[in-house]
Every structure is written in C-alpha cells, then in structure tokens.
Amino acid sequence: MQVARRDFEGFVAARSAGLFRTALLLTGRDRAEAEDLLQLCLERTYRHWNRISGQGSEPEAYARQILVNAANDRWRRLRRRPESPLGLTDGSLPDAADQLANRDLVLRALATLPSRQRAAIVLRYFDDLDDTQIAAALGCSPGTVRTHLSRGLARMRQVMDDAQEAAQR
Amino acid sequence: MNDFECQISDALHASADGAAPGGYLTERIMRRHRRYRLRQAAGGAVAIALVVAVPLSVPSLRPGGAPAAPVATRPGTVLRDCRDQFANGSYGPGWRTDSLRAGPLWFVQARPAWVTGGTGPRPFGALPVLIRDGGYAAVTVAGPSRGTFRFLYGSGTTRDSYTLRDGSAGVTFAACSPGHDESAYPGYTVFWGLFIVARFPACVSLDVWTLHARQPIHVTLPIDRSCRN
C-alpha cells in the first residue's frame, strides 16, 4: 500500500503540471475549475492505481481520459445554466501587443466550440497527441477525432475572421 | 501543420505554459479520496441494512454503492467488474441507434465496429460496452473467428500496438450495483475496450451468456460494411 502511494505521489509530481495546463485550456482558463478538475481526475486515478500502474499500462492516458470527460460533463452542466460571458478570467483582455491580442482571439474562438471539439483541439495542438491517442481520451474512433478537429478548426477560423472584420470596421 | 494550426498551437502554449497547480496537491487528493471512501462505506452500510431487511434472491441485484458481487466468471473468460468501469464514456444521446444489443449488454456504436488500425502487427478496433447496472453477461467468440479474435477490456487499452496475446477469448462483465454514481449513463455501467484481430473478417459471431440462461444469445458483430446481418 505504501509503495503504491509512493508511486502515485511520484506520478503526481511528474505529471500534474501537464494535466493542469490541459485542464486550464479545457476550462477556458478558469483556474479554480481547472484545479478542481485536476483533483477529481487524480483522485479517480488513485482509486484504480494498482490496476493502471502495472507494466504496459499508461496511467497518464487513463488520467487524461478522466480529465477530458470530466471537462465535457462540466461543459454540459454549464450549458444548462443561464448564459455567462465567455472569455478570459484573469483580466488580461485586449492588449496593445499583437501577440497578446492574437492569443486572446484564439482562446475566445476555442471557447465557442462544443466541448468535444475543444478537447480534440487542445489535445492535438497543446498536448501534441495523435488521432489514436485523442480517440482513447475521448472514447471515440480516430475517424470521429478527425471530424472534431476539422469542424473545430473551421469554426475557429470563422470566429476569428468575423472578429477581425468587426475590429476593422 | 499549416500556418493557422501553428497560430493555434503557439497561442495555446503561450497561454498555458508555465502554469502550475496550487500547493499541497497530494494532500488535497487524499482528502478527496477519504471523503469518497466514507461515502462508499456509508453506501455499503445501507446495502447491508437493506440486504438484512429484505433478502434478495439474485445476488447481483443488491442495492448500494459497492460493486455487485459477480455470480460466476464463465470458464474461458476474464472477469471485468465495477472496478474496471470506464466512468466517463461519452457516445452522444443517440448511442443506441448504431449499437448492438444482447440482453442487458450493448456493444456501443458497433454497426459497423470501429476499426482503429494501429501501428502494430495486429489490427484492432474499439468496442465499448454498456451493461445495465446489476447486470451480468459473458461474451465469447463463436464460429470461425474463434482463434483469430480477442477482447481487451480494462487497463492497457491506450497503446498503439497489440498482439493477440494481449487479449482474451472471452469476457465476463459484471456491472456495478444499481445506484452507483460514477457512470455518465445513469442505469448503465460502461466498459471501455478493444478487439484485436489476426486478420479482418467481415463479420464475427459472438455468444452472449446472461445470468441463468441455458442458451446464449447469438449476435453478429459487423467489422466491415459488407457484413450482411
């Protein structure tokens, strides 16, 4: 038991920062929500630690599955509530620097996507996962992942183009 | 990656790189875990009280949060129970439309099955299963695919490459007890898993054995659209 606990603590030390960053992007950079998602995901991982930490297993992939699906569930709950403004939560809205403005635009566009498209985009372009790995995290086929990515990118491009046009007017 | 994809990747990295969770993370996880164990214990106590008060004839239908006790693992199969559930499966509201049903068990979106491929010596595909809470079903391969088709459920299903030896020829699924609160599909227990094949057949015949049944339910799993069911 102590050995399992030590192994798990090692896993938390090594992987929690990466999982937290993914959680941060999945929640639209809501730090409190991301912290909560991370704890939920790691607690559930700990429940099954003896089974998933064996040879040939990938506890990080398992933890990522939980994280992504918990984020999807959260998004589903939020959709049932009255609409609240999407966007950044840390007060770093439009900045003079183009780079910051562009980052803000990308995050706003990301926030308009349905949860599974958003998850696919984050896992591909932030976590650098391939179709098969994303499919395992989302619990769907690689073909569906490609559909999510393609629709997500198209939607983001549309939102960003519209925003830029509006800014130029 | 094209320019637009690079732009997205750069923006995501710039906005999240360097962020770190707050301190005492392990302690907070363990505190959460202790609360979970307390809830489990409370659920178990309620279950025991109900079992004492209202004796049930079918052991797998005991209420409460604890895993249902498996009635039996069918010979030639491996057991997958509540501890192996994939609590977060997400297949959309119309998941039944393309799913294959056999008694209490559904092979989710398996008409046709998801063929994943992979980089290893054996092709594989996704074959998630939903089974009614409290339910029990053993699945075995029937017919000519018996020697070339394997199941893989539980941990170790996120790799890129498999051999037939990684899987088993049959699986006994014992769902969680009714009332467990982890599933994304209330009333069902979700098992994430794969099939591994030596070569792709068009169809695979499966036998599904349910509790107390003398004869299995025969189902045909279409691997290819050419499979006529």
Image (spheres, coloured by chain):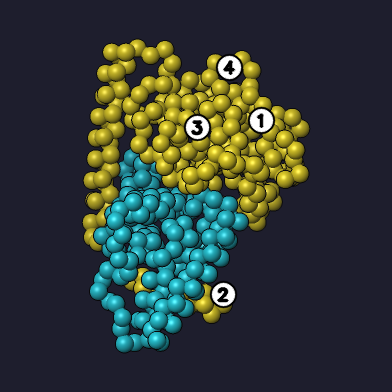
Chain colours: A cyan, B yellow
The amino acid type of the residue labelled 4 equals Ala
**Disc number for residue B111:** none
Q: CA distance from mark 4 to mark 1?
A: 15 Å
Mark 3, residue position: B131
Mark 4 element type: loop
Percent position of residue B173, x then y: 52, 30
Compared to residue A141, the image places residue B202 above or below, namely: above
Q: CA distance from mark 4 to mark 3?
A: 16 Å
The amino acid type of the residue labelled 3 equals Ile
Q: Mark 1 or mark 2: which comes first in sequence?
A: 2
Tell me, yes or no, if residue A133 can be seen here. no
**Disc number for residue B213:** 4
Decide which of A11, B94 is in the foreground and name it: B94
3 and 2 marks in contact (CB < 8 Å): no
- Residue projecting furthest to the front: A169
Q: Mark 3 or mark 1: which comes first in sequence?
A: 3
Mark 2, residue position: B1
Mark 1, residue position: B219
* Residue appearing at x 66%, y 44% in the figure: B112
| Circles 4 and 1 on the same subunit | yes
- Foreground label between 1 and 2: 1
4 and 1 marks in contact (CB < 8 Å): no
Q: CA distance from mark 3 to mark 1?
A: 15 Å
The amino acid type of the residue labelled 2 equals Met
Name the chain letter of the residue that bears numbered label 3. Answer: B
Q: Mark 4 or mark 2: which comes first in sequence?
A: 2
Quadrant of the image for the C terminus of chain B?
A: top right
Q: CA distance from mark 3 to mark 2?
A: 41 Å
